[in-house]
Image (tube, coloured by chain):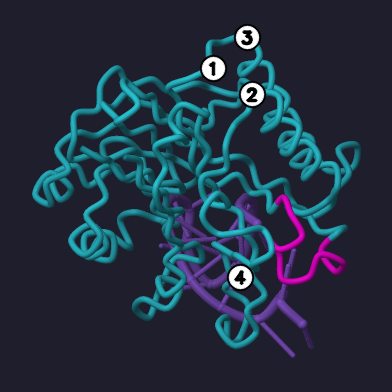
Amino acid sequence: MSISVATWNINSVRLRLPMVQDFLSDHQPDVLCLQEIKCQNDQFPTKAFEESGYTYQAVNGQKSYHGVAIVSRIPLEDHHAREFCQMGDARHISGVVDAPSGKTRIHNFYIPAGGDEADPVKNPKFKHKLDFLNELQDWFDHQDFDNGHVIVGDFNIAPHENDVWSHKQLLKVVSHTPIETEFLDALQARRNWVDVVRKHIPHEEKLFSWWSYRSKDWSASNKGRRLDHIWSTPDVAEHSTETIVLRDARGWTEKPSDHVPIISRFG
DNA sequence: ATGGCGGATCTTATCCGA
């Protein structure tokens, strides 16, 4: 009995509901973690997901911005949303599923983007991003994250050279600055988080999950970044059998999300 | 040129994302 977990920054779940339903119907992930749902809890399309068979839901929304949700067709228990940086932002939701490795908590994150300038003194948004990462590190240090956890979401950091279209040209661009990429690597290393995307798609291969809306032809220019991630604790990663990044989704319909879904299978 | 766009809401303007 295997399970599959998907993550997708949908950039408005209400606007792109039909696209998400098609995705669920075509790919049948057991669990789908959505970021940037951009709606309040009572505006979330609960019924539509129920009708698609995703009857287990955990939603942490807010007005206009951010917001995360998990919809699942397998039981999802013990929901919990953690607040970071006392900002009142909806950037995390988690729930527990039965996985081949046993009871496993799936965490869905939307890490702050960080604004334009990579300077925490001049740019409060970049400071917020670093504060968020620090708080995340403290949490990982003080809680039992040794086994039984999966973390997914839009981390807004493309950590390695082949996670961006040009390492050199992006070194000063927020999402790929050394302060961010080194922080993410350190965060990953001190808890032995396994990147179950790169476990199956080698670091030597360029891999992106986001392409800017501003590019005239996203596919031809292919100036993407790998901002979306799936990590797990080592016990869960032992069961990781496959991960796919649905690049084609960037071209689905006239109005796609600027991010594409990633699906990982365990067991 | 990746920021020549696209989302929600305070809607014909503004804030935000990356």
Alpha carbon separation for disc pair 4 and 3:
37 Å
Which one is closest to the eye, mark 4 or mark 1? 1
Residue under pointer 2:
A191
Q: Are marks 1 and 2 on the same chain?
A: yes
Q: Quadrant of the N terminus of chain A?
A: top left
* Secondary structure at numbered mark 2: loop
Residue A5: x and y in percent read 35, 44
Q: Kindly give the residue lying farthest to the left in the view shown.
A: A51
The earlier-in-sequence mark between 3 and 2 is 3
Residue A195: x and y in percent read 57, 43
Residue A209: x and y in percent read 54, 62
Which residues, given as a range, are shown in magenta?
A: A159-170
Residue under pointer 4:
A212
Residue under pointer 1:
A146
Which one is closest to the eye, mark 4 or mark 3? 3
The earlier-in-sequence mark between 4 and 1 is 1
* Secondary structure at numbered mark 3: helix
Left or right: A260 with respect to A205?
A: left
Residue under pointer 3:
A142
Dot 1 and dot 2 residues touching (CB under 8 Å): yes
Q: Amino acid at mark 2?
A: Arg
Left or right: A34 with respect to A157?
A: left
Alpha-carbon neighbours of circle 3 within 10 Å: few (<14), some, or many (≥20)?
Answer: few
Which one is closest to the eye, mark 3 or mark 2? 2
The earlier-in-sequence mark between 2 and 4 is 2
Q: How many marks?
A: 4
Q: Residue at 60%, 88% (x, y): give it.
A: A220
Residue A42: x and y in percent read 26, 36
Q: Quadrant of the C terminus of chain A?
A: top left
Alpha carbon separation for disc pair 2 and 4:
32 Å
Give the chain of mark 2: A
